[in-house]
Image: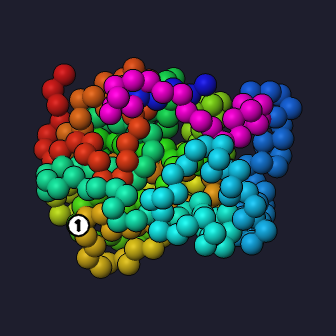
Amino acid sequence: MIKYYDRKTQTYQTEKVAGEKMIRWTYTSPVGMRLLEAVVKKKMCSSFYGWYLDQRISRRKIHPFVHKFDLDLSIAEKNVKEFSSFNDFFYRKLKPSARSIDPHKDSLISLGDGKLLAYEHINLDRLVQVKGITYSLQELIKSPEVALKYNRGTCLILRLCPTDYHRFHFIDSGICEPSHRIKGAYYSVNPVALQKVEKLFCENKREWSIFHSDHFGDILTIEVGATFVGSIIQTYPPHQKVARGDEKGYFKFGGSTVLLFFEENKVRIDPEIIEQTKLGYETYVLFGEKVGVRGGSFSG
């Protein structure tokens, strides 16, 4: 059971997890772990399933998925009959009216929909995956020079579960460098998996880029793939000016994660999100929602 904090209602909710029983069996049983290492984490497995979800026949999975997780398709650009495949439905675009972007230029907004963790004054060699399990930024991006810029900075981790909107956006205007690709495995990014696989983010397929933002400094953006995520698709134009809220890319089917690293004293995260992170809870946020402001870190 995965609980998260809903700050609109100020209550804790239980997440509806796609394939929850299978995930728990895979990551907690001896047989499941052997199958995971031998088959599930391999590229071939995720690539084959991703190929199937690109085919027209996969459309039959859409209605059961929408019904089981009570998804609101009225906010999508296409209606349910217009999707050409399950993946077409999965990375669906939303109507412009579906999400509102906080209008204040000093507001730090969420890059997408998902469950958010936030860490301030980070130690580059002991980034928190879950309580008791850490990894280093150098291991994650394989570039010690770039990693060093973010010592004592701020880290945001946005986890997109399969039921979430799966496009991610720029949080500010600016210019983004090309994306660097790092090959890896395809472990789940579900909290159950994060508790079982050490340095999971450093094991999985991932991409990273530097975004030269106009108001928040140079932001290190890392997209991490997961089980059955056949592709991380970057749709932005490198070296060209983008506006706040413009699309950066999207994930094909599967749970996924985006990490943002800010230089020291560039942002202040909303205290409520920091407090929930310290308590061990993710906070549910939507694209465009304010999650912090420009400036130094909160004291204490």
Which residue is pictured at 22% across the width and 42% down the height? Answer: 292
Instruction: Residue 19: tell me if it is visible.
Output: yes
> What secondary structure is marked by label 1?
loop
Crowding around mark 1 (Cα neighbors within 10 Å: few <14, some 14 to 19, many 20+) is some
Percent position (x, y) of residue 31?
Answer: 86, 32
| Horizontal side of residue 238 vs 202, given as left or right | left
Residue at image position (23%, 49%) is 108
Question: In x, y percent, where is residue 2?
Answer: 56, 28
Left or right: 56, with 145 as reference point: right
For the N terminus, give its image quadrant.
Answer: top right
Please determine whether, in this image, residue 77 is positioned above or below residue 272: below
> In the rendered structure, which segment of residues is drawn in magenta?
6-27
Q: Nearer the viewer, residue 270 or 16?
A: 16
| Amino acid at dot 1 | Ser
Total numbered labels placed on residues in the image: 1
Tell whether position 85 is magenta. no
Q: Residue at x 25, y 64 (%)?
A: 244
Q: Quadrant of the C terminus?
A: top left
Q: Which residue is mark 1?
A: 173
Between residue 29 and residue 116, name the one nearer to us: 116
Q: Position of residue 35 (x, y in %)?
A: 84, 41
Please indicate, yes or no, whether residue 149 appears anywhere in the rendered image.
Answer: no
Q: Is residue 10 magenta?
A: yes
Q: Residue at x 37, y 61 (%)?
A: 169
